[in-house]
Amino acid sequence: MPIKVLDKATVAQIAAGEVVERPASVVKELVENALDAGASQVAVEVRGGGIRSIRVLDNGAGIASTEIELAFERHATSKLDSSADLQAIASLGFRGEALPSIAAVAEVDVVTCAHGAVEGVYVSVREGKVAERKSQARPPGTTVTVRNLFQNVPARLKFLKALSTESGHIANVVSQYALAYPEVGFTLFVDGRKSLGTPGRGQLMDGIIEVYGLETARQMLAIEADEWGDDPVKVTGMVGAPGVSRSGRGSLSFFINRRWVSSRLLAWAVEEAYHGLLPGGRHPVAVLNISLPAAAVDVNIHPAKSEVRFRDERQVFAAVQKAVRRTLVAQSPVPRIEEVAATYAPPSGRERAFWPAAPVGRGTLPSPPETAPPLAVTLPALRVLGQLMGSYIVAEGPDGLYLIDQHAAHERVVFEKVREQRQSRKVEVQGLLEPVPFEVTPRQEAMLGSHREELEEFGFSLEPFGERTYLVRSVPAVLSKGDWPGALWELLDSGEERSDWSEKIAVSIACHSGAVKAGQALGDGEMRELVRQLEKASLPHTCPHGRPTLIHIDAGQLRREFGRG
Ligand code: ADP
Ligand code: MG
């Protein structure tokens, strides 16, 4: 083919692809515009995963009726004057790309009334061009309605996930801005149902309760101010007490000068601060505002503006890590930290090396070790000799000594039992004495929407009960004395779309059944019973997370260690 310049519509679609990846990107851009316009109220309504329609209403400055056409021109913005302004960007938008990008891949209607204008104006934009225009009454502010997203880009449409997943992403975007702007009242309606609402009273706590629920909110610690206060990097916000943890990194929110960004560097800084305070593979909850001189950060590195580059990475890393650590140390009673540190081993070398490369915001359970321990698959019959340090069972087999991690072994046994019951469709269920209300966040609700059936197959009965609340009537029997809400929360927070949910549910149930812990004295009978069950397990050598359940020292090794040959 000869070289030719692409036609305008194709160029517009290519450029739009960078800004508008999925419905949630549209919501993000429109909410940012509303915030830049100084709105104190922002309402978002979406239908059909945001593909059918997205509407964002604000009470901000509005767009002058003479400037609407311009607003839909590429690289037209009211937020930058000259390239010098690029050095220190104070607004969320600045590229003048969002409205034209959205209009290239969807139908857009705008109703806006600028402050002081006599009347408002309605325009409809089709294929990037204003197709219709008339006066329309509206209080000061702007309403943008986006319909039939990606209808003209079938390739993009194909890559979208289930509607409930897209709604989940949208709920996450609105949640993040509600956390970043406590002085702005946000509402989100998904398919006509209210899914989020913040009062806009200026209290970060309001947003945290709304997004993470009361239970987590109660355990959040406000970041302690820096005693010296002379660091140009200021960190404020809240972090979870060490007892609060999640299976994924989806509960880390970072705002740089109030811009929501994803940053591996910052995630790492926070996790460093929790070093030794969280079990391996678990992640903290944190909502952190980092303010620094606008010139010390470059936000102009990607059209979606969701990543930033710092002039001095080390300085930002250190400020965040210190602020979080300071808070954890100052606000957690000392014995507790020691207790937690003693119970939970710091993440192993492998996990630490693994995680910075993992995408932030996607929850993953720790993956099993790449090389399985070189052991026969089944265990020989073992004779229990006793308990070591309240945590390990010492046993003798025909071929030497076995040290069994009682907690890991028990998890393996419960995991196999749960899986077996599910496969044979004979799940033991425990009805609760009274139904228990279970509150979920908008994102958790979207997860629940996609996976409720699988959860029910494992014995959770969850009945919709008003706004973002479910009534739990029964739980898997093995969890009846364990932490079933913990299991549900872990699953709903995990955010992994493609993994095998049945497996994940079984792991989570095993992990929260909580019967045998490390540091718990076991009687001879209990130890024998646990070892008997482990012998019967199909994969006795690792717990469901992939950690070893036992260490074997064979007779030959013992002989060599004692210099017997
Ligand atoms: P940018 O935000 O980067 O300037 P956009 O394409 O998102 O680019 O918007 C173009 C312009 O339209 C903005 O600079 C602003 O002047 C105006 N605008 C867009 N949305 C709103 C809104 N909700 N309220 C007031 N003005 C708006
Ligand atoms: Mg914008």
Image: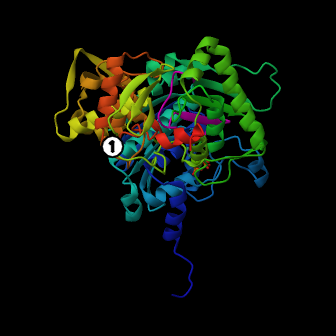
Q: Is residue 247 magenta?
A: yes
Position above or below: 76 against 277:
below
Nearest the camera: 128 or 24? Answer: 24
Mark 1, other Cα within 10 Å: few <14 / some 14–19 / many ≥20: some
Position above or below: 510 against 123:
above
Element under disc 1:
loop
Q: Which residues are magenta?
A: 240-260
**Three-letter code, disc 1:** Thr
Q: Position of residue 120 (x, y in %)?
A: 49, 41
Q: Position of residue 137 (x, y in %)?
A: 44, 38
Nearest the camera: 76 or 365? Answer: 365
Name the dominant secondary structure of the magenta segment: loop
Quadrant containing the C terminus is top right
Left or right: where 382 falls relative to 18: left
Residue 221 quadrant: top right
- Picture residue at 54% right of the left edge, 29% below the top: 285
Q: Position of residue 340 (x, y in %)?
A: 56, 20
Residue 404 quadrant: top left
Which residue does the numbered mark 1 point to in the structure image? 378
- Picture residue at 47% right of the left edge, 57% below the top: 103
Nearest the camera: 192 or 255? Answer: 255
